[in-house]
Image (cartoon, rainbow, N blue to C red):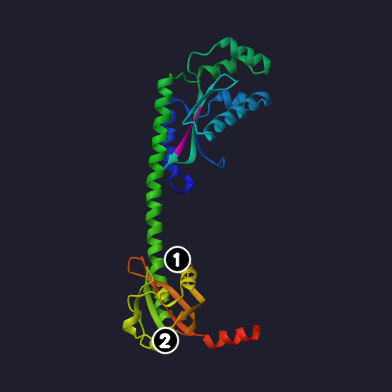
Amino acid sequence: MKFSELVDIEELRQLCESFTAITGTVTAILELDGNILVATGWQDICTCFHRVNPTTAFRCKESDTVLAGKLKVGELANIYKCKNGLVDVAVPIKIRDEHVATFFTGQFFLESPDPDFFIRQAKEFSFDKDSYLDAMQKVPILSTDDVESMVGFFSRLGKLFGEMGLSNKELEDANAELKRGGDLRRESEERFRQVAMTNWVWEVDLEGRYTYCSENVIETLGYSREEIIGKTPFDFMSQKEANRVGEIFTELIASRKRIIDLESWNVTKNGSEVCLLTNGAPFYDNSGNLMGYRGGDKDITDRKRAEEELVK
């Protein structure tokens, strides 16, 4: 599941921008493939200095890698002080226990910064010292409690947005499935009418029990319609054949696929065997719930016997 498909990104961005305006801290939300959905409030010390110089930029990437790596091994959140002297945080956004995106914040201090450290960095990487120290002064200082509260807030906020979006998506999917079920029902009923003109036709429920059987079944199996209703096709097969066809029927029920040219050997009332060619389609109620299958059987015994003779 993709986080961007479940949430209103623009609304989430506006919330993050408001948060940045109030706290002065960076926010970013990334999907697992690295796609940046939201990014607000990056500090000048990073955009104008650390992310520009090759060496300090490598440290930034190293920080990103460390944060992402710790999340992969299951840590709930990670606070990391990068080698450039600032603190970054990453926390997974989970929807129904699935990690779908990552919330990042950072570019702040957990205590008053040491000016000498940044003076040394300015000299080492040829930054303009006054501009660099001025950018340092703009970086907010947050307590650990502030950071944990902030991370918890955005984690819950992201989850809330995602859960709401997921519920809406599931509702849309359910409506689409309902429409699809109605289309399939009409299609299967049409197929049923076509089959009824030429074959012994039937209807079975999800357990495989006959709920309808045309009168001409007696011409094929020797049983009357009343003797068929309530039983299953497997009651008229050998145990080996019943097991084979039963597995196929179970798979069809699970996948809702059509029955297409399924051959099976059946035992008639007088004990002889006939080979039936079965075709059918699932049918649904008005709510789109699968109810069973409708179809028809055709006696192909003579053809199968002839094929057997050719093989001999």
Residue in front for this viewpoint, 224 or 82: 224
**Secondary structure that dominates the magenta span:** strand
Question: Where are the magenta residues, as a range?
Answer: 89-93
Residue 38 image position (x, y, % from top left): 49, 38
Residue 260 image position (x, y, % from top left): 51, 75
Residue in front for this viewpoint, 201 or 54: 201
What amino acid type should be assigned to the residue bearing mark 1?
Thr
Residue that appears at 46% across and 75% down:
238
What amino acid type should be assigned to the residue bearing mark 2?
Asn
| Residue that badge 1 annotates | 250
**Residue count near mark 1 (Cα–Cα under 10 Å), binned few <14, some 14–19, many ≥20:** some
Question: Is 205 displayed left or right of 53 in the figure?
Answer: left
Residue 99 image position (x, y, % from top left): 48, 40
Q: Is residue 42 above or below residue 83?
A: below
The CA span between labels 2 and 1 is 29 Å
Q: Is residue 114 above or below residue 84?
A: above
Question: Is 260 displayed left or right of 150 in the figure?
Answer: right
Residue that appears at 59% across and 14% down:
118
Quadrant where the C terminus lies? Answer: bottom right
The mark total stands at 2
| Residue that badge 2 annotates | 270
Residue 74 image position (x, y, % from top left): 50, 34
Q: Is residue 240 above or below residue 20?
A: below
Q: Is residue 12 above or below residue 244?
A: above
